[in-house]
Amino acid sequence: MEQMIEQIKTHLAEVEAFQSSDPEEIEHFRIKFLGKKGILTSLFAAFKDVPNDQKKTFGQQLNTLKVAANNKLEESKKTSGSKAKASTTSIDYTRPGQPIEVGALHPISILRNQVIDIFSQIGFSLSAGPEIEDDWHNFTALNLPEHHPARDMQDTFFVQTNPDILLRTHTSSVQVRHMETNRPPIRTLSPGRVFRNEDISPRSHCVFHQLEGLYIDKNVSFADLKQTLLYFIKSLFGKSKIRLRPSYFPFTEPSAEVDIYWGLETEADYRITKGTGWLEIMGCGMVDPQVLTNCNINPDEYAGYAFGMGLERMAMLLYGIDDIRMFYENDIRFLQQFSSMG
Ligand code: PHE
């Protein structure tokens, strides 16, 4: 026992004598005294074998050693830290910082956000639906029963061999879902991805984005539709001449195609408008009463309009992009050009 007390004293003297600001030596000191297999650990382990009447003295000595070792360690670390700091006074404060790479929103996201902003100013909310749809929401409820020839207007991808489950061919499916679960007045915008079994070319793709608008209330007229679209087109394109050409969609009656007058000032204007000055940008119409009935809305009480536009097509016009495939290839040189927008 005497011998152990002596040993502790020797260790204590060594701890007190230790002096270094060298990080390696300090670490060495730490491992030797305070490490998992260090001197203190083994002395504490020996504690249980010390006779009871001597436990007090031994314990006190041991504690003194522990406190001293810890203090010495902290102290040494401090001096070595301040020494390290002192040796780095040659920082060049004029050196330029590392540039931070700024990411970019995808052009389709930029445009979608712009369109949402424009319509939210006149009270449209947002809604969404699934990309994998059933036949009812994509076709049947929209007046496209089985074998209806207009189903061929949109070549469909079916999921496995089940003809009831498909990838939605348009965002009009979200109209149906929204009307089924909400009561008028309804004013909603549904952006989303749609899928059509089409060949990929510079002008068409099998995956693209649409943005659907739906407005249902009492006394909604075609004039409301035209006025809303004019407001939108002025806001987004800065153009104020539009025309509505009669068209056909099974779920709207009457239906129209919306053209904007783009102008014929530059060579590019001639090319994109095929020399007419006019550009078709979306489909629209008054919601067919049968569609309202399908969604449990009384057509004698309510009326409404709907419109649907392709985002890629509009982005191509606005940003001067002439190949739709650019949107899906994720070429960083293409995407980076949009880093200052949105
Ligand atoms: N769903 C139609 C399409 O994809 C667009 C449309 C939407 C037309 C709403 C009229 C009303 O071509």
Image (cartoon, rainbow, N blue to C red):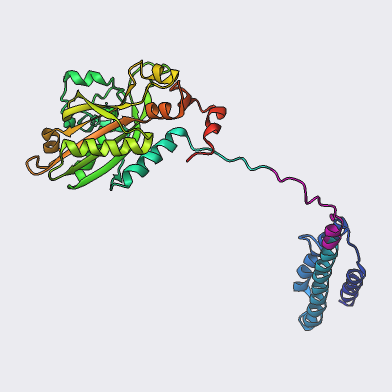
Q: Residue at x 83, y 73 (%)?
A: 68
Is residue 94 highlighted in magenta? yes
* Prevailing secondary structure of the magenta residues: loop
Residue 289 seen in render: yes
Using the image as rendered, state which of residue 1 and residue 191 is in the foreground: 191
Q: Which residues are magenta?
A: 81-98
Image quadrant assignment for residue 3:
bottom right
Residue 29 seen in render: no
Q: Position of residue 171 (x, y in %)?
A: 29, 33
Q: Residue at x 78, y 82 (%)?
A: 56
- Examine the rendered structure and indicate whether residue 5 appears above or below residue 137: below
- Examine the rendered structure and indicate whether residue 208 appears above or below residue 276: below
Q: Residue at x 6, y 41 (%)?
A: 300
Using the image as rendered, state which of residue 152 and residue 123 is in the foreground: 123
Apparent side of residue 85 relative to residue 293 in the rendered image (left or right): right
- Examine the rendered structure and indicate whether residue 326 appears above or below residue 185: above
Using the image as rendered, state which of residue 274 and residue 264 is in the foreground: 264
Outermost left residue: 300
Q: Position of residue 228 (x, y in %)?
A: 26, 39
